[in-house]
Amino acid sequence: MSGPSTLSLTEAVTDLEFGRAETAATILSALSRGFWGCSRSNALTRLTTAVHTLCDAGYNSDVKIWGKRITPSANATPRVGPLQQLTQAECLQFRLFAPGRDALWSGINRGDEYADAFDAEESEDGFDELCVDKADFDKLMAKHRGTSNSAKARPTRAVATINLPSLSDRDLKRWWDSLSDKERDLPMDKLHKQCVAAHPNNSIARQRVRDIAPKRKPGPRAN
């Protein structure tokens, strides 16, 4: 649920973390396509962080969050209440987010996509159709991004994201195969910078470089 003066939960957390708002209807496609230039698991971890940032702002009364309370009922259909503003206690309690729905469930994400989806599906205690006050959110964005003009800056960030497509798996593997044994033993930060320098027209998440490298044994690395 969103309107001229509000943003949906999904729009808020994706804009907060990635600088581009996605809806509940489009977020699953964005995750599947690696739209943000990082792995699905990394994107989900970052979205979970954004949920906590938003809920913390709600708890501190910096952002007003509204939703329809879902509670268990005697029959198989949970009760859905009217739209209401979440209290401080509710901002602490309801933080379990499963992409694809503007809802938060009692609990927090465990870091396992399937376990989190199962917990959300089984839960009958949560808030649906969540939305946040847009004016409050713009202030949060300004604080989060370190700029007082976030409303104008966000479209620029969105364009930058679109103009830098994620490096394909094939090209990433080709780059890795071209490295010498000495280069492959460099610290991960240097490997990532080297990969970015070799592909200036693409976005490459640090986690993707870490994922393609074989598991390393403990010990000092080449400088």
Image (cartoon, helix red, strand yellow):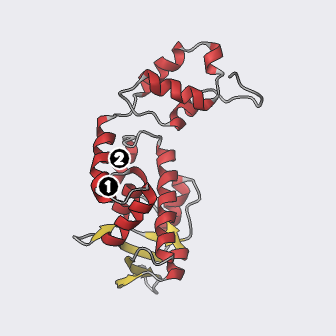
Using residue 196 as the reference point, say whether residue 214 is left or right of it. right
Which percent across, then down, holds residue 203?
40, 34
For the N terminus, the quadrant is bottom left
Label 2 Cα neighbours within 10 Å, binned few <14 / some 14-19 / many ≥20: some
Residue 99 in picture, x, y percent from top left:
41, 58
Q: For residue 25, what is the image quadrant? A: bottom left
Residue that label 1 marks: 22
Left or right? Give the position of 199 relative to 59: left
Q: Is residue 1 visible?
A: no
Residue at the front extreme, as displayed: 148
Residue carrying label 2 = 30
Name the secondary structure under disc 2.
Answer: helix
Work out whether residue 51 or residue 111 is closer to the camera in this orientation and state it: 51
Q: Is residue 220 visible?
A: yes
Q: Is residue 186 left or right of residue 125?
A: right
Looking at the picture, tell me which residue is in the foreground, 38 or 80.
Answer: 38
Amino acid type assigned to the residue bearing label 1 in the image: Glu
Is residue 3 or residue 19 the one in the foreground? 19
Q: Quick check: marks 1 and 2 in contact, CB under 8 Å?
A: yes
**Sequence-first tag of 1 and 2:** 1
Does residue 29 sit above or below 138 in this rendering? above
Q: Which element is circle 1 on? A: loop
